[in-house]
Image: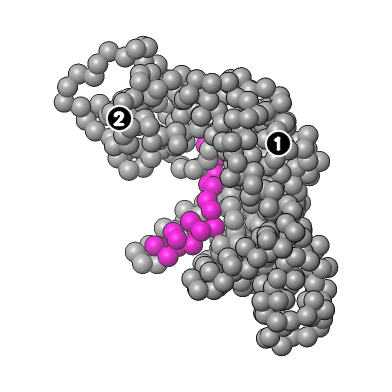
Amino acid sequence: MWLRPAVFTLEGQTLTIQIPNPFWQKTIQTRYENIIKDAFLKHTGLEINLSYIIQEIKEPAVSVSVPTETVPAPAVAPVTAAPAVKRNPFPSRLNPSYRFENFIESPSNRFSYKAAQAVVNKLGNRENNPMVIYSTPGLGKTHLLHAIGNEILQKNPNAKVLYMSGEEFVSEYIEALQNKSSESFRKKYRSLDCFLMDDIQFVAGKSASELEFFYTFNALFESHKQIVLSSDRTPQQLDLDERLSSRLLSGITSEIKKPNLETRIAILRQKRDSIHFDIGDDVISFIAEGIQTNIRELEGSLYRLVSYCSTHGVIPTIAIARELLSDILSREEERLSVNVNAIKKVVGKHFKIDMEDFQSKRKTQSVAWPRQIAMFLCTDLTDMSLPEIGREFNRDHSTVVHARDLVKEKVKNDPFFSAEINQIISEIKAVDKK
């Protein structure tokens, strides 16, 4: 959304970015400038400077080209970024905008926030190592991981800190095997001072990658190097080797829960103030009340509103927000309103089983499979926690996790089953509205 309308021109080691207004420039500077510089350094070896031109863009473009003619004089004098400074050559891959200072502390995340700060102050301390943060997606795990890394580098600019997702770790390990460069792969990871891995659940179940991570974990742990991991579930619920699972439980484990209304309003106010855009508290409250389950979506909705109002030169109002965010708000309402009994009723009718079967001890395929589908739909369509869903089916939360992952995998790989699930969801929503 922010980069597609811009026009990029490269001259020597200066990348000029033409954007339509000052707000656009500030957004790219604060959110993407370091990412752009790192991309050029990685792929071309150039340490570039960035220059901005504020000028109306008639033809959107995304290509980078070397001009053959002089660029027309800008409407506003270009703002040139400061010359590139010498920095730690180790690629931390951290987002500099994620810091402790702009993380909104609240009762839902206080323990994780304080524990993350303790990690920075006592790197590698056995009490805080490893640290595992878990929550449903979009509640701030990634922010805390980056904040830890940025704070470490602020205190020690020469520290070797690396942020990486579990999926990227697996992909890089496979590439190392293909290129016969396993030794350099191991050397890279085992020389770290702090390893920050997001979404470790993507490593679970991939035996070779999981084993490599286990050895990497042990090497760092025994060297008193810090390990911080995030996941969408607790270590006990991850399908990890027992040895690795026990290692994860040896440190500190913290959960981030869904934020209350006051916290969501505070998050939006902070974002509003950071981008210096005038949005009334009534609009802020409207968005915060309408989006309750995902901070990432909450912030994204604000940026979407700001972009629209900035482009069209209008003042944000509740009416504009309601119309612009209708798709997100309707999804949120559906998610929060669906009743678990409606799910059981429709799934039971579809598979011809009784309501009592959902809580029975029967494990025959004709009953177990519809029960697993119903549990999956509860995780997808309601705001209930895993233990709450488990109680509705007379099962524990680990059974719910297994059912969710099993059905999700089949939905992903079987288009006919996916269509069947979509039909069931439509029927559930129709029943729930009656």
Q: Using the image as rendered, state which of residue 307 and residue 406 is in the foreground.
A: 307
Q: Tell me the SS state at disc 2.
A: loop
> In the figure, 70 relative to 223: above or below?
above
Left or right of 274 on screen, residue 48: left
Q: Can you identify the residue that label 2 sits on? A: 59
Label 2 crowd (10 A; few <14 / some 14-19 / many >=20) = few
Please tell me the numbered disc located at residue 288. Answer: 1
The magenta stretch spans residue 169: yes
> Which quarter of the image is occupied by the N terminus?
top left
Instruction: Report the residue that reaches farthest toward the front.
Output: 434
Q: Quadrant of residue 303?
A: top right
Label 1 crowd (10 A; few <14 / some 14-19 / many >=20) = many
The magenta stretch spans residue 108: no
- Magenta stretch, main secondary structure, is helix
Q: Position of residue 314 (x, y in %)?
A: 54, 21
Which residue appears at 48% of the width and 71% of the height? Answer: 415
The part of the chain drawn in magenta is 147-176
Query: Marks 1/2: CA distance?
Result: 35 Å
Amino acid at dot 2: Glu
Amino acid at dot 1: Ala
Q: Tell me the SS state at disc 1.
A: helix
Which residue appears at 68% of the width and 42% of the height? Answer: 291
> Which quarter of the image is occupied by the C terminus?
bottom right
Q: Position of residue 285 (x, y in %)?
A: 72, 31
